[in-house]
């Protein structure tokens, strides 16, 4: 490996560590002091970096609060694209969501995972940004499902409807888990899985040729 490549790798790892530290410091402050009272200067002080450094990574403290959600979105899309090409759309999306939940909660811990979800849900100033994020992610998932099925999502509503139902079920499962005294991964996966199965009970695994019916 050449010296420039090694230096590039070190720089990338250092940037990732700084980004992660800013996210963790921001979330810790949001959870203990509240989102609105927390300032960017307080976040940077925790990590011992300048405000200028902060703005290299994030445009606002909202981006910090929603960063984990954005990471979840990438995990979900990657999990979906990795599913076998001939797998039915509902099966592929269901597996992708459950894989994302397991990976996210395993890396951050169930309590931390739920704390972030609760913070966003109960902070009005974050809701608009989170809704934009969710809408953008659902659009990307819709495009992927449509491509797997070989249909045009502008003419065939089934990919969009399927993604909307599964994502709504995911939110319901996580919201239910926030109120559950148990904080174990298996229980969270169980609730999300049950919500998805209830929401999609009438959808067949294989679709027909008529875009106006499943």
Image: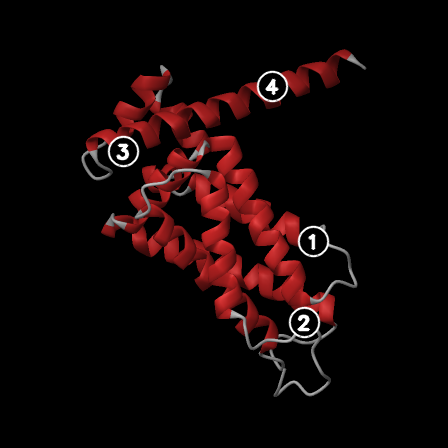
Instruction: Please tell me how crowded label 3 is: few (under 14), some (14-19), or many (20+) other residues with Cα within 10 Å.
Output: some
Ranked by sequence position, the earlier of labels 3 and 4 is: 4
Q: Is residue 60 visible?
A: no
The reply to whether discs 2 and 4 touch (Cβ–Cβ < 8 Å) is no
Instruction: Please tell me how crowded label 1 is: few (under 14), some (14-19), or many (20+) other residues with Cα within 10 Å.
Output: some
What kind of element bears circle 1?
A: helix
What kind of element bears circle 3?
A: helix
- Where is mark 4, residue-wise? 11
Ranked by sequence position, the earlier of labels 3 and 1 is: 3
Q: Please tell me which residue is depicted at 34% across the width and 39% down the height of the picture.
A: 115
Instruction: Please tell me how crowded label 2 is: few (under 14), some (14-19), or many (20+) other residues with Cα within 10 Å.
Output: some
Q: CA distance from mark 4 to mark 1?
A: 29 Å
Ranked by sequence position, the earlier of labels 1 and 2 is: 1
Left or right: 99, with 40 as reference point:
right
Q: Of circles 1 and 2, which is in front?
A: 2
Ranked by sequence position, the earlier of labels 2 and 4 is: 4
Percent position (x, y) of residue 181? 31, 41
- Where is mark 1, residue-wise? 81
Q: CA distance from mark 1 to mark 2?
A: 18 Å
Quarter residue 159 falls in = bottom right
Q: CA distance from mark 2 to mark 4?
A: 46 Å
- Where is mark 2, residue-wise? 205
- Where is mark 3, residue-wise? 31
């Amino acid at each position: 490996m050449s010296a420039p490549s090694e230096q590039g790798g070190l720089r990338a790892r250092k940037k990732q560590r700084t980004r992660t530290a800013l996210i963790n410091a921001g979330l810790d402050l949001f959870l203990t002091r509240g989102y609105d009272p927390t300032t960017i200067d307080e976040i940077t002080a925790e990590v011992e970096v300048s405000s200028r450094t902060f703005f290299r990574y994030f445009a606002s403290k909202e981006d910090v609060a929603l960063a984990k959600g954005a990471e979840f979105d990438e995990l979900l899309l990657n999990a979906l694209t990795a599913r076998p090409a001939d797998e039915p759309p509902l099966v592929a999306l269901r597996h992708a969501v459950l894989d994302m939940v397991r990976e996210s909660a395993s890396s951050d811990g169930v309590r931390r995972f739920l704390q972030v979800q609760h913070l966003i849900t109960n902070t009005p100033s974050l809701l608009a940004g989170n809704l934009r994020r969710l809408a953008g992610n659902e659009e990307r998932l819709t495009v992927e499902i449509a491509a797997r099925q070989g249909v045009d999502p502008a003419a065939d509503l089934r990919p969009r409807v399927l993604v909307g139902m599964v994502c709504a079920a995911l939110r319901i499962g996580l919201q239910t888990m926030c109120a559950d005294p148990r904080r174990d991964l298996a229980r969270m996966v169980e609730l999300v899985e049950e919500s998805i199965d209830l929401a999609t009970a009438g959808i067949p695994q294989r679709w027909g040729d008529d875009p106006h019916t499943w």
